[in-house]
Image (tube, rainbow, N blue to C red):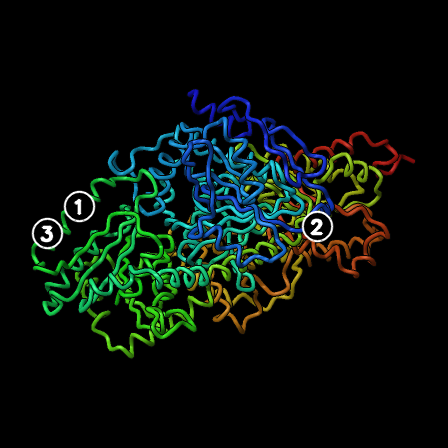
Amino acid sequence: MSKSYINLLDLASGNFPTMEGRRKRMPRVNTAPGNLSDLEDDQARSVSSDQPSSISSDRVIIVANQLPLKAKRRGDNTGWNFSWNEDSLLLQLKDGLPDDMDVIYVGSLRVHVDPVDQEDVSHVLLDEFKCVPTFLPPDILTKFYDGFCKKHLWPLFHYMMPFSAEQGGRFDRSLWEAYISANKLFFQRVVELINPDEDYIWIHDYHLMVLPTFLRRRFSRVRMGFFLHSPFPSSEIYRTLPVREEILKALLNSDIIGFHTFDYARHFLTCCSRMLGLVYQSRRGYLGLEYYGRTIRIKIMPVGVHMGWIESVMQIADEDCTMRELAQKFKGKTMFLGVDDMDIFKGINLKLLAMEQMLKQHPNWQGKAVLVQIVNPARGKGIDLEEIREEIQENCRQINEEFGKPGYEPIIIIDRPVSISERVSYYNIAECVVVTAVRDGMNLTPYEYVVCRQGISGSKSCSNFDGPKESMLVVSEFIGCSPSLSGAIRVNPWNVEATAEGMNVAISMEDSEKQLRHEKHYRYISTHDVAYWSRSFLQDMQRTCADHFKRRCWGIGFGFGFRVVALDPNFKKLSIDAIVTAYKGANTRAIMLDYDGTVMPQHSIDKSPSQKVISIMNTLCADQKNTVFIVTGRGRESLSKWFSPCQRLGIAAEHGYFLRWSQNEEWEICQQSFGFGWMKIAEPVMKLYTEATDGSSIEIKESAMVWQYRDADPGFGSSQAKEMLDHLESVLSNEPVAVKKGQFILDVKPQGVSKGLVAQKIFTSMAENGKHADFVLCIGDDRSDEDMFEIFGHAKLKDILSPNPAVFACTVGQKPSKATYYLDDTTEVITMLESLAEAFDTLPPTDIGYESDP
């Protein structure tokens, strides 16, 4: 194993090496009571009290790659001046949070601060801005941000796969290690602040996707949300990432995960389904993922703009001469406006080509239509930035040479930083904003443009923003804001001709139609602003975390396989010592065991029981105090063959439709039979879906039919099962059968047949023979076994069991269940049964139950 890979394992397990000399720690604020642990000692520990503390009211800690601050070195080079970055989404979202909620920011600065100044800067930022800076060493920063974030995650999340070195390069594990190291440094800063019983943590964007694992490992009940501001790619793209499962599992340590659009959420859920085998479902309008007893809520909510901030900028721009100068410069022209970062995915060149095509297709716009393209500086060292800039300049030159003339240039490129007030001035005079990004997480440019065209309410008549103006939008269908802008002209930016035609339609449309579209957009944007977004996310986080202190939580797993298991307080692991003690003290015992997934591993190819299982069954059955049953959905023929050595073993086959008390007795039918003519109706339907679903098969039993799709594509198989469920319920509506969906199966069986009913029948028969069970053990692993566990809450059982029976309802695997106990896997089940069998061997002869010789 390579040295770098060993270091990675150290990092993932919490053994974090010192990147620089021992740094002085910042004083903690509202630290967890009784937990002043060293930052260097980050082994997997859970710190949370059973009762919430009363140190302070709720507070939210917002963690992002960069703080919402501007930093400028003083002229005398003796220190720094800091101010809020009013354009930052992180700052603007405070408007949606409760007034009495404290907000603290954790993130890095855009400037390098010398190590000797870092402690002073930390105190200033905390005292004056409630900001806690994370100082990343230069070597980690370069590999973390410019390396893993911009060379691996950013391209992949925007659907660019690294086919060659020119397209992002091959996966570099040292960059991944730097990404982990950086996330660990952010984690350490959060630890200095957090009160885990009171605080909410809100993590932002793809830079910090493994941070939830570090936090959840330390604080098992921390209330934590994550919002991804970039796209999330389809599973076919995402699965190429070598650390795909590590990132998914880290994100699943959050309580709520937010996305801008349903497409992004759907891609994430599909990845969880295909790579982790998780199942998601909609509950009362919310999407949720069940993950080790925790329900992770999936939030779909596009972010909005800050209306008040834009209006304040409009007022500043209105007093500036820039607006009048621009209005004079473009007088008599129809302006298209583009505002994009210098990035390979913004589609700036496609926009220029579309403008060229429009001028060719509609020559009447030559000399009139102008495209002003503002190019913001790149946010990092992305891919092919210089090549993109050169291509933009070259296309601009060629188009201007072809269509330009004295006093007219069809394309104007502004390749410099543009202030927000200047940008607002351009919004005010532009007839149409064009966004041709080939992939973008959200893109708020269209929102800002619509708000600016609406003007300032109550402004003077002489103001440049004195009233609503029409606004038109041509937007790529591949950006996050596109679904919410139903009045925009949506285009495929790769289709240059269609984009050109869309631009022509936008500026040729009747003013009345433009006005209607503008009003529709403004109503949505003004009611779904950034405050609405943050308020909605926080409220959902609060709902999701409402029962954190009502459940027992503990962490399991190593590295990024770490997860928290959250279970009902009454749900606990079955103690072998406890059950053996109860077993020895009982006089009448009932033992009911599922087969597949309980005494037989679910994925075993050979389904026949091992010799060890046969031996244990025989030993248990030899004790006359015991009534032992295998209760399973399997057919009686295979069960009779497999358990032929077990003379006294009872078998309930096909979920209890057939029942046999011992090998010497006849099979009973536990349900009145109305015939099986329904099979002739169901079989053609099942065959139809089997032919259309590769990897599926039909099992025809004596009383039931099962369609299984364990080996099919997970997404397609589940979809086909839902469709078949509706189909079968429709064609069998008049038949005495029930259609149920299980784990990778669809089951059609007679009504009134269940493991719960057969268990009740066994208890009743025992009671009629004078055997009221005072020890009951039921073990199973899937949904059909829940029927068995559920009956122990029924009052009618009190008459057929002994007054105070020892009941052990046990599921296999740590998951939500109606059972009271669990065992981790089939190995533990066999070990426990073996312990019971050994207890029989140690009982005194008078307790065994055989009659003594006269």
> Where is residue 693 shown, x and y percent of the image?
38, 55
Instruction: Name the side, left or right, on which 742 lies relative to 344.
Output: right
| Numbered circle sitting on residue 550 | 2
Amino acid type of the residue tagged 2 in the rendering: Lys
> Where is residue 228 shown, x and y percent of the image?
45, 49
Q: Quadrant of the C terminus?
A: top right
Say whether disc 3 or disc 2 marks the residue closer to the N-terminus: 3
- How far is disc 3 from disc 1 in space, using C-alphas? 11 Å
- How far is disc 1 from disc 2 in space, using C-alphas? 60 Å
Residue hosting label 3: 398
Q: Is residue 664 visible?
A: no
| Numbered circle sitting on residue 391 | 1
- How far is disc 3 from disc 2 in space, using C-alphas? 68 Å
> Where is residue 126 shown, x and y percent of the image?
57, 40
Quadrant in which residue 555 is drawn: top right
Residue located at (54% from left, 63% from top): 739
Residue located at (56% from left, 66% from top): 737
Q: Nearer the viewer, residue 276 or 15?
A: 15
Amino acid type of the residue tagged 3 in the rendering: Gln
Q: Is residue 837 visible?
A: yes
Element type where label 1 sits in the image: helix
Element type where label 3 sits in the image: helix
Q: Quadrant of the N terminus?
A: top left
Amino acid type of the residue tagged 1 in the rendering: Glu
Which of discs 1 and 2 lies nearer the camera? The answer is 1
- The 10 Å Cα crowd at callout 3, few under 14, some 14 to 19, many 20 or more, is few
